[in-house]
Amino acid sequence: MNNISKLWCGVPGSMDELRYSKTTHQKPVVVWNSTQRCNLSCVHCYSRSENKLYPKELTTSEAKAFVDDLSDFGVKVLLFSGGEPLLRLDLLEVARYASDMGLRPVLSTNGTLITQEKAAQLKDAGFSYVGVSLDGIGEINNRFRGKPDAFELAVAGIKNCLKAGVKTGLRFTVTKYNQKCVPEIFDFIEAQGIPRVCFYHLAYVGRGTTIANDDLTHEETRAFIDYVLDKAESFHLKGLNTEILTVDNHADAAYLYLKLKQKDPKKAEHVLDLLKLNGGNSSGTGIACVDFTGNVHPDQFWQHYTLGNIRAHKFSQIWSNNKEPLLEALRNRKIHLEGKCSTCGFLNICNGNLRVRAEAIYGDIWAPDPACYLTYEETKSD
């Protein structure tokens, strides 16, 4: 994640201690796909979730044992994801247990199931943040999500969370299909007083592989980031405390630095130091994923590669196995990267970007990330 509000405007963020400190990546943020069942059918779903029961889901006792291990291991954040996590019947119980064990539970949801009562329950369960996916305004979101009233229900869920006093933000995956909605999304955020928005670049995994051709071109991506930077500055000048972030394309960090270098060279050097502390993509180091059956993955996009299963070995043991081939390679990826990535002057702040995108397009996890929009000249700038 790149906190645009902090890096571009100097506004402190809610998770700066995880992103821009010397202890960054000490222990991973763990994404738990607590269920694969989902009430929607999103065109970019990385887990290909459907509205059906999936076998072998972790039991409540197994989930709590998993939480115990995370707590002992020193994990700070457990992100409950899915599928749609609110379809898991014991979600609130496990979240409350995680909170009591000292973890920070956060929720990634489509928002359509959050009634006023459910929002109050989320607060009582200890959720410190709820991220609601919204990929357009009105009908565009509904078609993106595969449900006629998905937008209306998600908006109601957002309002219910805010009313209940739960910090709530938006998650927006930008594609050719919905890029025209970005100005409306900013208007919506401002009108509703939403404190956070994460703009995700498309990952070519799961159902996302079928719409890879709908990703923005490099020129469109640059224009999109320029717009986000302008809106972040506009929000800041208005005194709005909205956190604006971009996710899943670490070329954003280098691009922001190069823009800032032209605008304010002294500030740019400070930002570069922060970006070096962050280190870029952290698959296999700063982020981990455990799916609904207990399989451990380098991140949520590596569902096709399993490092082990927590029913056989504790997560802490699996994650600490530096001899596991993919983990070892991801943790030492700079020597494996090829092409433009291998010679990039910003490798220390990007770390090779998303390897799963390279794999999807080139069949080689070490090939350049096709979504990197920096020119060769720009990659040699620092």
Image: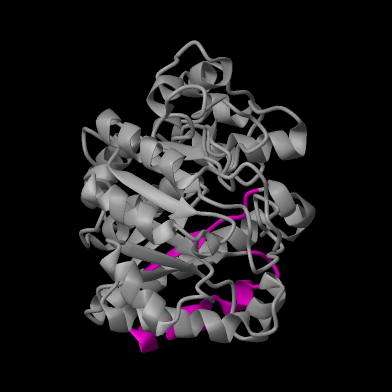
Q: Measuring 70% from the left and 66% from the top, which residue is drawn there?
A: 41
Q: Is residue 373 left or right of residue 268?
A: right
Q: Is residue 331 above or below residue 223?
A: above
- Residue 104 seen in render: no
The C terminus, quarter of image? top left
Q: Measuring 39% from the left and 74% from the top, which residue is drawn there?
A: 231
Please give the range of residues in magenta: 175-203
Q: Measuring 56% from the left and 24% from the top, which residue is drawn there?
A: 307
Of 35 and 25, nearer the camera is 35
Instruction: Please identify the quarter of the rendering in which residue 116 is found.
Output: bottom left
Locate residue 159, reporting x and y percent: 39, 84
State the scheme by which the image is colored: one colour
Of 188 and 28, nearer the camera is 28
What residue occupies the far top of the structure in this picture? 323
Q: Is residue 319 above or below residue 93?
A: above
- Does residue 199 belong to the magenta stretch? yes
Of 149 and 200, nearer the camera is 149
Q: Is residue 255 left or right of residue 112?
A: left
Instruction: Please identify the quarter of the rendering in which residue 122 is found.
Output: bottom left
- Does residue 367 belong to the magenta stretch? no
- Residue 80 seen in render: yes
Locate residue 108, reporting x and y percent: 46, 60
Q: Is residue 126 left or right of residue 251?
A: left
Q: Measuring 26% from the left and 77% from the top, which residue is drawn there?
A: 165
Locate residue 347, reporting x and y percent: 45, 31
Locate residue 203, reporting x and y percent: 63, 49
Marker count (numbered) = 0
